[in-house]
Amino acid sequence: MSEQARATVAVTGVTGALGSRIAARLAERGVPQLLVGRDADRIPELPGAERRGPAAYADASAMRTALAGASMLVLVSGRPLGRRLEEHATAVEAGVAVGVRRVLYVSLIGAGPTAAYRNARDHWLTERFLVESGVRHTVFRAGIYASTPAALADEELVVSGPGGDGRAAFVTHDDIADVITAVALDDGPRSEHDGATLEVTGTEALTLEEMVSRIATATGRPYRYVPKSVEEAFARRWRQDISGVQIESWISWYQAISKGEVSAVTDVVPRITGSPATPVERAGWWPAPGSAGR
């Protein structure tokens, strides 16, 4: 992207672990940005960036105001279960209405209409919407975050669920952000990544027991994985007064791993960034136990 031709990029989710990393990388490269968030007070201040908000995906008027002036939108997924398609479609349509010509969408590995993981089915719907909309776009199917097992741990640092001996190609937030940044910087009239679906994964597929063991080594804390049956997992969450749809999402995350639906290892990180994917034990950031919104 030349200095004269740099697009203004709107980045959503900038108060989260992924969106903040993408925005920081684009700022380092001198890319003009609009930083969009629901909570305006939490939006970071970055050089060359304008803070826009509050703007929720479901609020078409607020999103049009927030995205005005952008020609590219980095859309980091919203969280509401069962409403992602409607919210994402509203955000994209609002952006297109005010001049957004290209969308970079952060989806989920294993996305599909019959995916075991509830969230992966939601993401697939947004992917289909982007195709049908005709907007220029690239889909990034992010692997399971390396940080997620740590966030799923309880107060005793136990990660438990029906993951069995299945494997996942866990990936760091930094690697995902590097891939998205590289594609965003390739902003000529056409890009080889237009219409592409890029599966962004780590270097190897690990069982949950292996992954949690690496988290324990990296943090120096006694994290451990305890396999549970689906019935045991349901009972545990039900006793915690968690909604049915949240229980389904939580259990289905483990089932996707158990069934091998998120185990593919790709070369996207080194191919796009020119650097090898980061070993998961070097993720460098481990969220607090019990902080996962699943």
Image: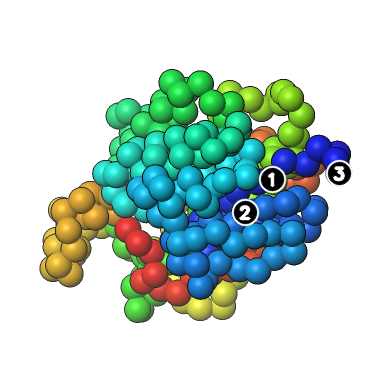
Element type where label 3 sits in the image: loop
**Label 2 close to label 3 by CB (< 8 Å):** no
The label number, if any, that marks residue 8 in the structure image: 1
- Residue 198 at x, y percent in the picture: 59, 33
> Which quarter shows the N terminus?
top right
Q: Quadrant of the C terminus?
A: bottom left
Q: Is residue 40 visible?
A: yes
- The residue located at (64%, 38%) in the rendering is 71
Q: CA distance from mark 2 to mark 3?
A: 17 Å
Could you tell me the amino acid type at mark 3? Glu
First in residue order: circle 2 vs circle 3 = 3
Residue 81 lies, in percent from the top left, at 29, 49
Question: Looking at this view, is 170 or 87 the one in front?
Answer: 87
- Circle 2 sits in a helix, a strand or a loop, which is it? strand
Amino acid found under the numbered disc labelled 2: Leu
Q: Are marks 1 and 3 in contact (CB under 8 Å)?
A: no
Residue 110 in sight from this viewpoint: no
**Disc with the residue nearer the chain's start (1 vs 3):** 3
Query: Mark 2 near mark 1, Cβ–Cβ under 8 Å?
Result: yes
The way the protein has been coloured in the rendering is: rainbow
How crowded pointer 2 is (Cα within 10 Å; few <14, some 14-19, many 20+) is rated as many
Residue 37 image offset from top left, x and y in percent? 49, 59
Compared to residue 70, the image places residue 49 above or below, namely below
Which residue, given by chain and number where applicable, does mark 3 sit on?
Answer: 3
| Residue indicated by mark 2 | 34
Q: Could you tell me which secondary element the residue under label 1 belongs to?
A: loop
Left or right relative to 238: residue 108? right
Q: CA distance from mark 2 to mark 1?
A: 7 Å
Task: Name the amino acid type tagged 1.
Answer: Thr
